[in-house]
Structures are given as C-alpha cells and as structure tokens.
Amino acid sequence: MISPRTQRKRLLALADQLEAGSDLTPEQRAYLLACFRAMGHGEDGNSAMGLSYTPGRSKSDEERRENLRLIFSWIMTAMNPDPEYGLGYSLTEAIDKAYELSQQAGTPFTPMERDSIASAWDKDKYKYLKSLEFRSSDLHSPMAYETPPET
C-alpha cells in the first residue's frame, strides 16, 4: 500500500513527465485509467488517487517513518565492520551517535529521543525501514520521487 505522501511525490513526478512530453508507461496508463473510472463512478478524488489517510495513519506518522528510514540506514552503515564502508559500531554505539546527530542542526535527521530510536529499532512494524539503501519509490522514502527511466 502506498502512503499518501509517497503518492503525492509520484503524482508530481508524473506531472513533470507529462509536461516534458514523455509517453506514459503501460502501468501509469492503467493506473490513471482506474483512478479516472473510480472518480467517474462517484468515488472521492483523494480516495481514488490514494491521497487520503486511512484510520490510524497521519502526515506526522509518515514523516516519522521517513525520518526513521534515514536514521536506520545510518545505524546499519555505522555498524558495518568494514572500515571502507562503516564505522564498526555496536548497535548501542550506533543508536547513541544517531541520537546525537538527530539533535544537531544541519543533519538530514529530525530530532528524536534516544529511547524512541532504540524502541523503534526493536519493533517489528518498522523492520522494513532497516535498509542500507533505498530508492525514491520505496515506501516512506525521504527522497523525492523520480519517474523510472523508460526501457
């Protein structure tokens, strides 16, 4: 399921693609067709386009998950024992340093408490956020969405 925030990024990328005169992919065409049909049959546009928050979800929840994705990626990199790619930190050291970085201006992190980072790290519901790398199309990606290149 795509979050409304991720969907907004995708729609902006699609607008850029259309403005540039690029062709739609078959998947994009099928998606827009389904959305327009749903709206034509009376479904709310925000709902049809995937822009509505479902119960239990909010913009602040999405922003928190994007921040956790960044922090978790940093933690995993910091724990890499290879000095060329990581710092060889233990989990505790990596969480401590991630907390410190989150409190500093000019970092990509939004401030979080150390206990909140550690607690989120241990929760299964955030397991999918633990990745060394991420793409703009990933759920809760902090990156601006880019239209995939044509193949």
Image: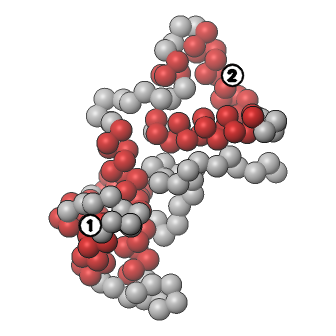
Mark closer to the chain start, 1 or 2: 2
Badge 1 marks a residue whose secondary structure is loop
User: Please, what is the three-letter code of the amino acid marked with disc 1?
Assistant: Gln
Which is closer to the viewer, label 1 or label 2?
A: 1
- Is residue 83 among what the camera can see? yes
Residue 34, image x and y in percent?
64, 22
Tell me: 122 left or right of 82. left
Depth check: give the residue in front, 101 or 95: 101
Q: Quadrant of residue 72?
A: bottom left
What's the mark number on residue 74?
Answer: none
Secondary element at tag 2: helix
Q: Is residue 143 above or below residue 27?
A: below
| Outermost bottom residue | 83
Q: Residue at x 37, y 47 (%)?
A: 63
Left/right of residue 137 with respect to residue 107 in the rendered view? right
Which of these two is toward me, 147 or 55?
Answer: 147
| Above-or-below relation of 38 to 50 | above
Q: Is residue 118 visible?
A: no
Q: Residue at x 30, y 69 (%)?
A: 104
Q: Residue at x 68, y 46 (%)?
A: 147
Is 141 positioned to the left or the right of 79 in the image?
right
* Residue 70 position in % (x across, y down): 41, 62
The percent position of residue 4, horizontal first and vertical second, equals 46, 35
Circle 1 crowding by C-alpha within 10 Å: few under 14, some 14–19, many from 20: some
Residue beneath disc 1: 103
Kindly identify which residue carries mark 2: 33
Residue type at mark 2: give it.
Leu
Give the x, y percent position of residue 86: 45, 84
